[in-house]
Image (spheres, rainbow, N blue to C red):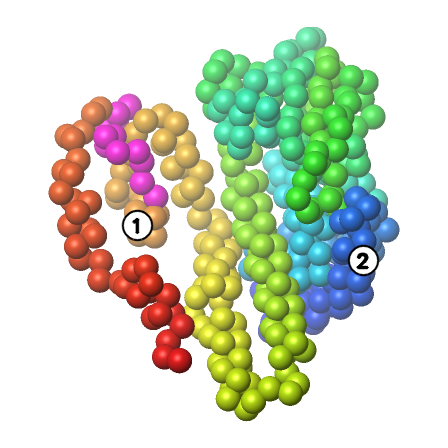
Amino acid sequence: MLMSTTPLLTADERDAILEAVRDFSDTELAPFAIERDEHKIFPRDALRKAGELGLGGISLREDVGGSGLGRSEAVQIFEALAHGDTAVAAYISIHNMAAWMIDTYGTEAQRTAWLPRLVTMGDLASYCLTEPGAGSDAAALQTRAVRDGDDYVLTGVKQFISGAGEASVYVVMARTGDAGARGISAFLVDAALPGLSFGQLERKMGWNAQPTRQVILDGVRVPASALLGAEGQGFKIAMSGLDGGRLNIAACSIGGAQWALDRTVRYVHERFGVGRAARRERGRRVRDRRHGDRPGGIPRARARRRRGARREGSGCHDAVRHGQAIRDGCRIPRRERSPATARRLRLPAGLRYREGGARPARAPDPRGHQRDHAHDRRPRGAARVRACLGPR
């Protein structure tokens, strides 16, 4: 099992972990990726082998069998997995996100009941937020959880749920209070409960190795002990899970892009590598170098993912606070923002911070947009393409 015995891994330990993950990806994922996608095969056996490596609980605490790794190591692991099969790697990332939420916000009874099985990937987990009328916006969801004695009764439909029908536990966001984010709570719903059913498999362009269905809750009765965190805390739980989950999916996207680039370069070498003039061969090598090594594209995306992982791993959750500020229609005071957040995150135009709410600001100066473009000296259109390609 991939275990971290110290809070900070040495370079040798990190390299050994990544080497084991790449070996797993090359032997258990890559050779079967096309077949699994064509025939919509969900690879439970491969997932159990991933669990034996500790990939079912990458960032979970070690007292429940987790690997205890940080966010920086996690994103490198997901990139390596995605180089073999992006669809399977993405589901492993979702499983890890749901397990992390249980580990972070669950009671000891919830952690003990679910996490040892989730770490081995003998049992699987899914995350249920999106609905037919609401995307990843917890404040707009309509699924309701009504208190009935010592139980809650859940009714509603969740849409585009990865792992639906295969998972053993579903982290479900449901409304327990009034409209808005403060009325959302999170629940752990056992797949064996009456009233829980699933829709047909979604028709997708790829990613067919992981099932995607509706999760239908028709009067599903769960005990009060299934409440994750406190009542009304669901928005915070959902957004904090997505803070790491989005980084993991970004890492999966980079891994898939790197696979595509590697295959493209290999094809060009095989297709044009024999019987061509030396000048053509040199030109081809230059093009390979420009697309694979220039400071843009995949290397730049990887650098941004690395920075995001360091920030999230250090406990910086400005994105969650800004989501709450946007919901309430006010700015976070400038003095409370980190410099990076101040640069990257903004509220809609026409709002400015005021204690207790928002008030209309003065109309923006239409000339400001023009001035911004006047100072932007980067080449555009065909000139920008020529600048990227360089001299012939």
Could you say which is closer to the camera, residue 333 or residue 170?
170
Residue that badge 2 annotates: 32
Report helix, strand or loop for mark 1: helix
In the image, the segment drawn in magenta is 345-358
Query: Image quadrant for the C terminus?
Result: bottom left
- State the image coordinates of residue 308 (x, y, percent, origin top left): 47, 55
Marking on residue 260: none
- State the image coordinates of residue 244 (x, y, percent, origin top left): 55, 47
Residue at image location 58% in from the left, 49% down from the top: 249
Query: Image quadrant for the N terminus?
Result: bottom right
Magenta segment includes 21: no
Q: Does any portion of residue 171 appear in the rendered image?
A: yes
Residue at image location 27% in from the left, 38% down from the top: 333
Q: Amino acid at mark 1?
A: Arg
Q: Is residue 187 above or below residue 275?
A: above
Residue extending furthest toward the bottom: 278
Left or right of 122: which side holds 89? left
**Mark 1 or mark 2, which is nearer to you?**
2
Q: Does any portion of residue 169 appear in the rendered image?
A: no
Q: Amino acid at mark 2?
A: Phe
Could you say which is closer to the camera, residue 108 or residue 330?
330
Sequence-wise first label, 1 or 2: 2
Residue that badge 1 annotates: 343
Left or right of 140: which side holds 2? right
- State the image coordinates of residue 287 (x, y, percent, origin top left): 49, 76
